[in-house]
Image (cartoon, rainbow, N blue to C red):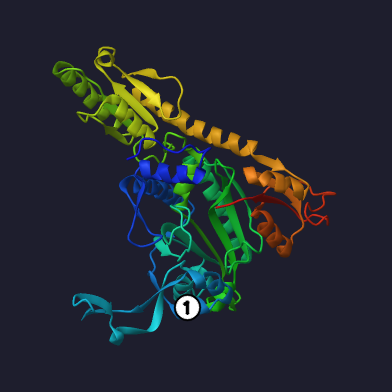
Amino acid sequence: MSKNITKRSEDYSKWYQEVIANSELIDSSPVRGCMVLRPNGFAIWENIKADLDRRFKETDHVNAYFPLLIPQSFLSKEAEHVEGFAKECALVTHHRLRTVIGEDGKPKVEPDPAAKLDEPLVIRPTSETIIWHMYGKWINSHRDLPVLINQWANVMRWEMRTRPFLRTAEFLWQEGHTAHATREEAEEEATRMLQVYKDFCYETLAVPVVTGVKTANERFAGAEDTYTIEAMMQNGWALQSGTSHFLGQNFAKAFDVTYRDQNNEQVHVWATSWGVSTRLIGALIMTHSDDTGLVCPPKVAPIQIVITPIWRNDEQKSVVLDFTDKVHGLLRKHFRVKVDDREGVKPGAKYYEWERKGVPLRLEVGARDVEKNSVFSARRTGGKKQGMVVDENFLHTVENALNEIQQTLLDNAIALRDSKTKTIRTYQELLDGIKDGGFFMAPWKDDSVNEDKIKDQCRATIRCYPTVQDDLDGEVCFYSGEPATHWALFARAY
């Protein structure tokens, strides 16, 4: 494991890769574009999942599970949807292998020609089609609505260029799929779930996001509207961190999902879908981490507190370890805690390892600390080290420290985002500023052709039309000079 990480200012992409490697979040797999989530990485995902799952259930959603394999014909039922995903789909074409002898005289396996499927099966890139097939069976009356289902699953999209967490062939996610009696209910659901994502990012990941609606060029295949949360990474690039889609009646019509309303008429239902993925771990890394390594918000950190006992002789060892056991016993019922009592590893090496892995709070226990009935604390976010007395207020003191670390990370991220957000009114300002990253708010006339031109010219894209829109009175489009229709957020993006 390397001890020296490339500085962000020197090579941001290399820094990102090295932070991941040094904090042991993932490892490469034999399959291109697929990642092995190591225990540290998977623990972050488990904590994200637990928090979001609670929020979903508080908003009356329930969990279910749908098949990994989808009949190929299902993707053809909604034309825009299949066009959006056709180039990313992986297929299962056979249900059996056979053993043959190769040219080198050794046995090998190959698809059995006799086991070719009548219809290929798609490994799910997303589950709208299979879920709406099932909803067609389950929904008959207005009494069956709304249907509010979420699924925790893996999906596969055959990406040509991959980057850990941000864009991989297989990834973990949740996908919510809901059916409603009216357009208004479905639109309310889509915006409500976007707010759930926003609250989660602020409160749990300490990642400030901008909410808004995507342009027609950027919306989800098959949706009428796509709502998004956009986060700014430390290099000023945007990362789409979650989306919520108002699907209208497109999938209901494609799969003939209707209900008999109170007037005894057959009506197509209205739909939404929404999801976030392990991409959120990439957002966390690039929002908070530094040139030492990973910085992890306490609310999702695999280990929130590491205790490092220090002794010089056997007599001190016994006393220090006994006190460490006491401290650990007090903390373990309330926090995720680890004791690092490895012998043969110097304290400085231990400190550096846990800093590199992003543990928010380190507690040191030496012989003098035992005499004072205290521990010595150091925060991953920096600042002055301080003692904590192990008394009746100890748990409250530790909790306050973790909450302060969480708030510091959010405050720092908000300050960085705000310092790199600029309102512009000329295209030259975008050309001059985009190379250094940042969010650029510009008056804009909705035009997909001009949107593509800007993307080709400077690789900036419209991340969204922000939810909060300032007055456009008298504003003209910064690109075409025509009357503006929106304030648009431009940025380079992953």
Q: In the depicted view, which residue is nearer to us: 175 or 303?
A: 303
Quadrant showing the N terminus: top left
Quarter of the rendering containing residue 342: top left
Percent of width and height locating residue 116 = 33, 84
| SS at badge 1 | helix
Percent of width and height locating residue 287 = 51, 41
- Left or right for 356, reference 219: left
Percent of width and height locating residue 38 = 32, 49
Say above or below: 305 vs 182.
above
Residue under the image location 28 percent in, 25 percent down: 347
Residue 271 visible at all: yes
Quickly name the residue at label 1.
Answer: 74
Percent of width and height locating residue 189 = 56, 58
Quarter of the rendering containing residue 213: bottom right
Q: In the depicted view, which residue is nearer to us: 179 or 456?
A: 456
- Left or right for 31, reference 204: left
Crowding around mark 1 (Cα neighbors within 10 Å: few <14, some 14 to 19, many 20+) is some
Please state which amino acid type lies under the numbered disc 1: Phe
- Left or right for 423, reference 96: right
Quarter of the rendering containing residue 359: top left
Residue under the image location 18 percent in, 77 percent down: 105
